[in-house]
Image (tube, rainbow, N blue to C red):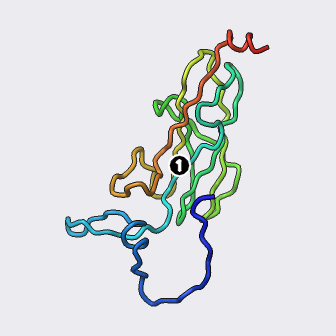
Amino acid sequence: MASVKWLTRIHAVRDPFQGYWQTSDYAYWDYLDRRPVRRALGEMKLKSEIARPAVYETLEPNQLYTVSGAAWAGETDVTEVAISTDGGQTWAEGEFLDPVQRHTWRRWKFDWHTPNRPGRYTLLARARDAKGVQPDQHDPNYGTYVINYPLPIEVFVASNDARVKRV
């Protein structure tokens, strides 16, 4: 298991802690009066993740398949999730499985009728909250942190010939 942390003591402080991880590494670039300023990471931002299917999973053609995942909005409520099965060309609304609850992942599902045509398909999910829609691309000011843009899940739809061979 990576990055296991053990709490050994707590110190209450009046001012923000200025340790290396809080000010240098777990931080991002912001701008104040057009000058770069380093700010500590805070609340997780709006995002949605696909949990199923797995990356490069092979699906049967012309079948109902339930795509599922979860969405997060932190300080606000996740109000909508949309799923694309064509790499972001078109979007359809997903269905929430959980009620609205702040600071909680909200599970969702989307019933996809897989295409007859075999090939590679790119699935995406994006969430909406009161402030808007999650961004389409990563903000480079966040470096390797704050991955809240839609992560593509590439899947394969098998050919009917491959399906017959497996039987």
Amino acid type at circle 1 is Ala
Q: Which of 13 and 137 is in front in this view?
A: 13
Image location (x, y in percent) of residue 60: 69, 22
Q: In which quarter of the image is the C terminus?
A: top right
Image location (x, y in percent) of residue 118: 59, 16
Q: Nearer the viewer, residue 72 or 81?
A: 72
Query: Which residue, as the protein is rendered here, is positioned at the far front?
Result: 1
User: Compared to 28, does 164 lie above or below?
Assistant: above
In the image, what residue occupies the spot 20% across and 67% down? 35
Image location (x, y in percent) of residue 4: 61, 66
Q: Nearer the viewer, residue 106 or 154?
A: 154
In the image, what residue occupies the spot 43% across and 82% down? 17
In the image, what residue occupies the spot 65% across and 36% down? 53
The number of discs equals: 1
* 35 with respect to 41 (left or right): left
Query: Which residue, as the protein is rendered here, is positioned at the far right?
Result: 167
Image location (x, y in percent) of residue 46: 50, 56
Q: Which of 76 and 65 is in front in this view?
A: 65
**Dot 1 corresponds to which residue?**
127
Classify mark 1: residues with Cα within 10 Å, few (<14), some (14-19) or many (20+). many
User: Compared to 156, does 91 lie above or below?
Assistant: below
In the image, what residue occupies the spot 62% across and 20% down? 115
User: Compared to 154, does 147 lie above or below?
Assistant: below
Query: Which residue, as the protein is rendered here, is positioned at the far left?
Result: 34
Q: In which quarter of the image is the N terminus?
A: bottom right
SS class, disc 1:
strand
What is the quadrant of residue 10 in the picture? bottom right
User: Compared to 40, does 151 lie above or below?
Assistant: above
* 154 with respect to 62 (left or right): left
